[in-house]
Image (cartoon, rainbow, N blue to C red):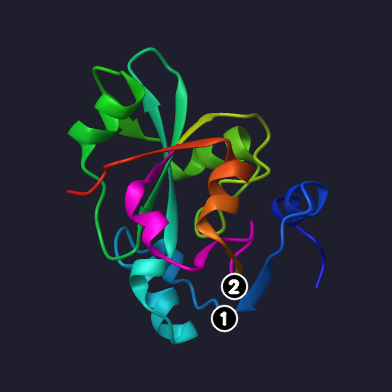
Amino acid sequence: MKKTNAMRILDGLKISYETKSYDDDGEHELSRGAAAGIAEKLGIDAAAVYKTIVMRTEKKEVVVFLQSAEHEINLKKARQACGAKEVTPVKPDELLALTGYIRGGCSPLGMKRSFRTFIDESVLQHEKVYISAGLRGEQIVLAPADLVRAAKAETCDLVL
């Protein structure tokens, strides 16, 4: 398998990780539940799969949130975390131009630009977590502290 930008970043930081593949059958088109479906395909706890949600504030700042597949993001808490009055999801057709990734394969690592990133604090309860490797059908498995460091992220409560 070819290395993705996310993998190259982890390699550059000398962070240990592994990858897990799953059959991508287009579930990324679903508005909700795709990350939980990935967990089911991999036979893992959905709580350990973290989906990447790219949003824009009222000031047009792009911010990135990671939330466990078993929960929806609380928009009020997301606004508080980034200090915005409003946050709205980036449209799927804008995602590639902004991040370099497509929907269903958006990794919090290796985006075209560096954006402020916030991860739900539940991430720290896991031994290993799963994030998109930067393409559909591939997940990166790594320690939560390594994810926080690599993403230059802040942990906070984002649960609905």
Secondary structure beneath dot 1 equals loop
14 or 7, which is in the foreground?
14
- Mark 1 vs 2, N-terminal side: 1
Identify residue for label 2.
Answer: 137
Outermost residue toward the top?
Answer: 59
Q: Is residue 46 left or right of residue 138?
A: left
Q: Is residue 75 left or right of residue 153?
A: left
Looking at the rendering, the stretch of residues picked out in magenta corresponds to: 118-136
- The reply to whether dot 1 and dot 2 touch (C-beta < 8 Å) is yes
Identify residue for label 1.
Answer: 22
State the image coordinates of residue 24 (x, y, percent, origin top left): 54, 76
Residue 140 in which image quadrant: bottom right
Q: Badge 2, how many Cα within 10 Å: few under 14, some, many 20+? A: some
119 or 16, which is in the foreground?
16
Residue 122 located within the stretch drawn in magenta: yes
Secondary structure beneath dot 2 equals loop
State the image coordinates of residue 86 (x, y, percent, origin top left): 25, 22
Identify residue type, mark 2. Answer: Gly
Which residue lies at the image location 69% right of the left edge and 52% below the top edge?
A: 6
141 or 36, which is in the foreground?
141
Identify residue type, mark 1. Answer: Tyr
Which residue lies at the image location 31% right of the left edge and 67% below the top edge?
A: 33
Residue 124 located within the stretch drawn in magenta: yes
Q: Is residue 44 left or right of residue 33?
A: right
